[in-house]
Amino acid sequence: MLYILAIIVFVVLSSALVRAFILSQRIMDSLDKPKKKRIQNVTFTRQESIRQLTEEEDILLQPYLNNKDLITCPYQWESSLISSDVTTIKGYIKREHANNAKIKDAFYYKMDDISLFFPYSMDHHIAGFDGLVRKNTHTNIEPINTAEVVFTKSYAIVVKINNYDLLQAGLNLSCRKENQIKEYWQTGKLKPIPLSRAESANETFTQLITEESAKVPTFEILNKREKNQFETAIEDQSNSGKLMIGLFVFGMMGLLVLEHFQSLVLVAFSIICFILSMIASYIKREIPSEYVNHIKAQIRDNCPVNHQLSIESNFNVFYPKHWKMFLPNNSDVSIDMQAELKTAQLISYGDYLSISEEVKNYGAPKFIYHNVLLAITGLILAVLMFFLTNAGEKLDFTYQILNDLITIRNIDDKNSINKSSIKPQTDYNAIFSGNSSNLKKADIVKSVNYHNEKNSKLLVTTQTIYNFEKNQLFSFSSPILINNCVFLFVILISLINSILIIWKKGSNHLRLEKIISNYKDKFIQDTN
C-alpha cells in the first residue's frame, strides 16, 4: 500500500514540476520578446534636422538635381529636395536588387526602409564594403554606418558617410593632389592645383583647394640626370622580332617549294632570307634618352607583394624583386634614392643597393625574347610539316633505304605482281586500296608490306620516278632529301633556342644569387 502511495506522490510531483518548468519558459519568452525587439531597434537610429544644408553642399548637389543622366538606375530622378534639413541616420547598409529595373543587376542602397543615393561615388566609403562588394568578415556582426542625408520624394541623398563628406568627394581633392604630385615628379616644380570658375567664386572651395595645393610633398627632388650605360643595360633592347620571324618563315617556304621545283634560285633565296633573319635578330631598337630623379625621401610604407615603397600618401616608387629583403617597412629619416623618371623604378637605394654596381660587377642579365619566338616558330613549322608533307614517313623511308631494309620494285598492277617472283603475304587488292592493317602511306610510297622469307620489307609503288639507287637519294634533285633536311632544320632551330632559353634563365638565376650574397655581406659588415 505504501509502495502504491509513493508512486502516486511521485507522479503528482513530476507533473507539477513539468508544468512549472513550461510556465517559467513561457514567462521568460514573453520577457525576451520586447528585449529582442529593443535590440533590433537599436540597429537603426534617426535624428531629425541636425543642421541646414550648407551653400557649398547645395552647389555640389545641383548637378544631380538638374541632370537626370547623373542619377543611375533604378533610382527615379528627382529635381528638388523636400527641404534643406540634414538628418543623421545610423544603421546597417545593404544592397537591394530592383526587380523591375531596365538594367540587369541594378540595385538600391538601403538603410532600414530608406533608399540612399550616393553622389560622387561616395559609396566606396561605406563601412563593410570594398568598393561595391561586401567585405568578407570573420564574424557575423555587420558594421554600423553613420550617414547625413537630405531627402527627395523618392530617396535620400547622402552628404556625409562616416568621416567622408560631400566637399571631399565633390572637390576630389585626393585625386587632384595626386596629379599635382605626379607633375612635380616630372618637372621638379610644385604647381598650384587649378580652380574652376565655380570654385573660384566660392570662398570655402577656394580655401580648401588652396590649402591642399600648398602642402609640400614629403620627398625632395635633388636633381635630374640621364641614365648611364649600366642602367640602360638591364633593359631588353631587342626589336619586336617580326622581321626576323618573317624572313625565317620565307626561307623555310623557299626550301619547301624546292621539293617540287628544283632550282638554284630558290636555294639562293632561302639562304639570303636566313642570313637577313640573323642580321635582323641583332638589330637593337632605339631607346630614347631616359632620365633619373635623385631624391631624398622617408618610407611611409613598404608593400613587398607589389614591390613598392610609399614615399607620399598618394605616390609610390617601385623596386627590383631581389631588393625586397634589404628594405625596411618604414623609416623616420630621409634616405637617398634614385628612380627612373618615367616608371618611378628605383635604380639605387641608400649606400649599397645599386643597379649600376650590379651590372659593373656581374654583367647585364641575358634576354630570351627572340629565343622564345624562334623556338615557338620552329615547333609550329615542324608540326605543320609533319602532318602536311608526311615528313615522318619520308624520314622512315630514308632510314629503311640506308639500312638495306627495303626493296624497291615498280609494279604497275596486280597482274604484274602475279607474274613476278614476289610472294607477298597480304592480299593484292588490299595493297592497292590502302585498307590493309600492314599498310603505310606517303606521297611517294603507295604501300609497305612485310615479307616473311628474309624478314625484309617490300615496297610496292606505281610511280616509276622513284626507282632510284642509294646514291640518288642524296642528289640535289631528291625531293625526299630536301624535305628531310628542311624538317630536321626547323627541329634543330627549335631545339637550339629551347636550350638557349634554359641556359639564359639559369645564368640569370646564378647572377641574382651572387648579387644577393654580395648585398648580405655588405650589410653584415656594416652592422659589425
Image: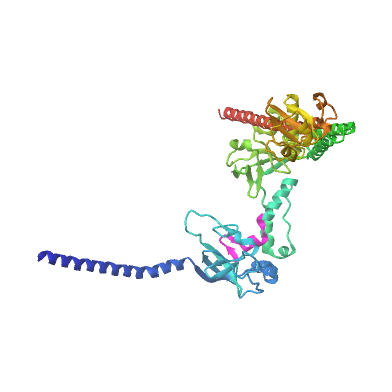
User: Residue 312's spot in the image, x, y percent?
Assistant: 64, 47
> Number of marks in the image?
0
Q: Is residue 312 magenta?
A: no
Does residue 235 appear anywhere in the picture?
no
Question: Which residue of the protein is positioned furthest toward the left in this rendering?
Answer: 1
Residue drawn at x 88%, y 31% as measured from the top left: 268
Q: Is residue 171 magenta?
A: yes
Residue drawn at x 50%, y 60% as measured from the top left: 142
Q: Is residue 406 above or below residue 218?
A: above
Q: Is residue 381 above or below residue 15?
A: above
For the residue pair 215 and 471, the one nearer the viewer reads as 471
Q: Quadrant of the N terminus?
A: bottom left
For the residue pair 344 and 493, the one nearer the viewer reads as 493
Instruction: Say which quarter of the image contains residue 267.
Output: top right
For the residue pair 32 and 294, the one nearer the viewer reads as 32
User: Residue 20's spot in the image, x, y percent?
Assistant: 26, 68
User: Residue 422's spot in the image, x, y percent?
Assistant: 74, 29
Q: Is residue 38 above or below residue 311?
A: below
User: Residue 316's spot in the image, x, y percent?
Assistant: 65, 46
Instruction: Say which quarter of the image contains residue 310.
Output: top right
Does residue 44 appear anywhere in the picture?
yes
Residue drawn at x 73%, y 44% as measured from the top left: 342
Colour mode?
rainbow
Q: Is residue 457 above or below residue 202?
A: above
Residue 233 relative to residue 22: left or right: right
Q: Quadrant of the C terminus?
A: top right
What residue range appears in magenta?
A: 158-174
For the residue pair 195 and 227, the one nearer the viewer reads as 227
